[in-house]
Image: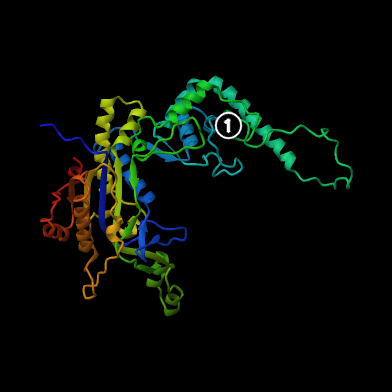
Amino acid sequence: MTEAPRSQFLSLHVLETLVAVLPVRDENGSPKSMVYGGVERHMITSQARRRAERVHARNRANAGVGALAGRSTGLRTREWALITARSLETVHGWDRQEAVTTARAVIEAVGLKFGDPAKKTVANLTKVLLFAPADTGTRIAAHVHENADELRSWRDDYLRAQEESAKRTARKSKPKNEPGPGPGPGPEPGSGPEPGPEAGSGPGPGGVPGAPAASLPVLPKHHRDAVLFAIAPRDAIDIALYGRFLAEIADSPNVDGAVQSSHAFTVHEAEQVDDFYAAADDAKLDRKRNALDFLEAADDAGAGMTGYQSLISGTFYRHAVLDRRQLTTNLRAAGMSEGEAAETALAAEKEFVNAFVEAFPEAKKNSTASTGSLPALVLAFEGDRPYNYAAAFQLPVDENPAAAGGEGPAGPAAVRRLLRHHAFVSDRRPDLRTSRVLTYDPQIDAVLGEVSGTPKEVPAVRSAEELTP
């Protein structure tokens, strides 16, 4: 029997109930929110979710666990110069300071900008996060060491030119102490200095178009190509899944992500709790406990620190889509054969589904145990296009059973809504197929029994691995 072809898109939908957590915060430390259906909802941003899922899959692969065990993954960081320097130092025996200086110069010369050299905390960090294969630093270090004599000579010229350029800039920007001449006739036409190139019109460090003009030695092409290959996406599976955008280097390929993620939001109106906390000072309380008289005990009264933290609770809906065609395209672009790309795409899909179900942002994880949460319901299905069911919750769930239209607890009410919405849509969209549901909640399992007689019954599975055919 021939299997039916798989659809291009795998749509995933989750309902999860969280209690007294704070998985993501705004710049003021408050929970993020949005307005939908005329009421405020708590929100967990897709960025927080995507990073949690990406790191979850990467850690499993590096630990030899799961469908991607042992495969190449990526690392998103500003510290590639420091990582490269560490490899030069520990593997190839370079002096630490020389290693850092050389690594920064080589990476900067291909077009990546670094922080202010006068500020030690950022001097050797790139200005943007670079998502590249985890072995990028090792590869660059190996090339630098292999061509050490040539690159040391180039580096010295590069740093000398940088220093001279900085001195010229400082002299031009230095204010003059003496007042200039008073008003007088202007210069003769054509007698002034020749206009220089406009900022951004000439090649910058490493010959990068669009950067400010500077007379810095260009990194020889074969060295530049080696660095570009090291930072290229190559076969890093999570870059193929989530994509990357690198505007700083025009000839380093960007990757269109195969995963689409929505912000999670509560299916009901948001309610926030400002929790007052008092942190005890152990030494202070020990003195109080061992005080010999009342006055000594009074001197050590009170908490060591107090404050407030905002916590949220609620049932959240979130959604993600895997574009299987884009994933395969990304893997083929990385140099894989058709067969290898197809096999790797299947493994990546399994791990993506596992991460979507299992991973959780780690903010406040120790004080709220948020990462132990399990979804109330996961709905998965295939289609010729993505399907987002956020509209099922435009009308917020009213948990008051005594109110007109009250639906009771948000978890079961949201499950009923989601499954009714899916049945309604799938009756009108013939491309929807291979639907499956997974629950970790016995109350929700009972609700699934109630809706088992719908026109398009959705079979229940017992593990995340069974959610994708």
Rendered location of residue 109, percent (x, y):
55, 30
Q: Is residue 312 left or right of residue 418?
A: right
**Residue at the image point whose x is 13% and y is 58% from the top:** 451
Residue under label 1, please give it. Answer: 209
Q: Is residue 191 left or right of residue 13?
A: right
**Closest to the observer, 59 or 376:** 376
- Residue 398 sits above or below residue 221 on the image: below
**Residue at the image point whose x is 20% and y is 45% from the top:** 430
**Residue at the image point whose x is 77% and y is 46% from the top:** 175
What sort of colour scheme is used for the picture? rainbow
Rendered location of residue 289, percent (x, y):
37, 71
Looking at this rendering, what residue extends furthest in the bottom direction? 294
Q: Residues within 10 Å of mark 1 (few under 14, many from 20)?
A: some
Rendered location of residue 49, percent (x, y):
34, 50
Q: Quadrant of residue 330?
A: top left
- Residue 232 sits above or below residue 426 on the image: above
**Quadrant, the N terminus:** top left
Q: Quadrant of residue 279?
A: bottom left
Disc 1 residue type (three-letter): Pro
Looking at the rendered structure, the secondary structure element under dot 1 is loop
